[in-house]
Image (cartoon, helix red, strand yellow):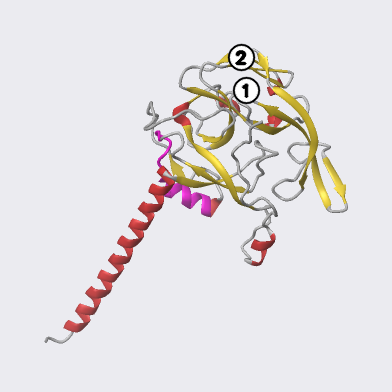
Amino acid sequence: MAPGEPQQVEKESRGQLIWREIKGLFWVLLAVLAFHSFIAKPFYIPSESMMPNLLTGDRLVVSKYPYGWSYVSPTIPNPAAIVRNLLLGSGEPWSITLPFSKGRVMGSLPERGDVVIVTPPGGNQDYIKRVIGLPGDTIELRDGRLIINGKAVHAEPRAPAMIPVDANSPCGMHQFWGRRVETEQGPFCRLPIVRETLPNGVTYDTVDDGRSQGDDYPPVHVPAGHLFLMGDNRDHSADSRFSLEEQGLGGPVPWENIGGRAEFITFSLDGTTGLNPMTWLSSFRDGRAGTSLRPPRE
């Protein structure tokens, strides 16, 4: 055996080992992306538009299969955006959305009251809203009162929601002026609640924070294959009532733009998580893990 030959064999074996690891990681990544695309994926709540039911910092599970699959279903990572988010905190979506394609595979319409994720037409960032109007419905708001097909939805004032104030729910900095109250347990955001009951019996709480631009909305017919979506935080939600230029959904959205159904909260963070692992446990909010997002019926 010539001098140096064993060393060559060792180098080849090390290279083969590295290649096997790369292939293994590739198949794991492919399996994760397939699961995210067709079964379920995690979702982070970035805003207050679904308060009081969802808080900024909530982490959810969104199932992909209940409504079938469309062009927004595949999870396709955008490496450049991921790097910019990690290094610069750009806040842009981490994935790429395919060009619009009409129709769904094994599709079915959401039910009225479902909480869904939706991609605005022409966009690639997921919103989370509630399904209010189905194809053929006429949706109207008059002085903050929701009207479906000419009939006002039953709305009942409830006791205020007391949301603990934290870094993710500051109360009064960007909205809810004058709603902060101090108690022996600490500061809370005291939110006026109105409980709505849709025609199919689905019931849920909304926040009524006074007069806002979206309180009056002229009657709009929901076309075939479209849905009308709204946030539960009615006075602070960019949804189907607002144009795309206003960061809304631009009216009823094609059902192809629905990416999945929100199922339950896995955990929730108050916004104090830092690089120090010692801050991780203390940043968990109590009592939110496992909360179902499937609306009850009366």
Percent across and percent down for residue 147 are: 66, 18
Q: Are marks 1 and 2 in contact (CB under 8 Å)?
A: yes
The three-letter amino acid code for the residue at tag 2 is Asn
Give SS at disc 2. Answer: loop
Q: Residue at x 63, y 52 (%)?
A: 289
- 131 is higher (above) or lower (below) than 42: above
Percent across and percent down for residue 33 are: 40, 49
Q: In this rendering, would 261 be left or right of 17?
A: right
Which residue is disc 2 drawn over?
149
Asked whether residue 75 appears in the rendered view, the answer is no
The three-letter amino acid code for the residue at tag 1 is Pro
Percent across and percent down for residue 42 are: 52, 48
Say which quarter of the image contains residue 131: top right
Query: Within 10 Å of the Cα at label 2, are there few (<14), some (14-19), or many (20+) other Cα atoms?
Result: some
Say the numbered circle drawn on residue 199.
Answer: 1
Q: Residue at x 79, y 33 (%)?
A: 158
Q: Is 77 in the magenta?
A: yes
Query: Within 10 Å of the Cα at label 1, are there few (<14), some (14-19), or many (20+) other Cα atoms?
Result: some
- Residue in front for this viewpoint, 29 or 82: 29
Say which quarter of the image contains residue 189: top right
Q: CA distance from mark 1 to mark 2?
A: 10 Å
Q: In this rendering, would 181 be left or right of 17?
A: right
Quadrant position of the C terminus in the picture? top right
Q: What stretch of residues is rendered in magenta? A: 69-86
Furthest-left residue in this view: 1
Percent across and percent down for residue 290 are: 61, 50
**First in residue order: circle 1 vs circle 2:** 2
Asked whether residue 49 appears in the rendered view, the answer is yes
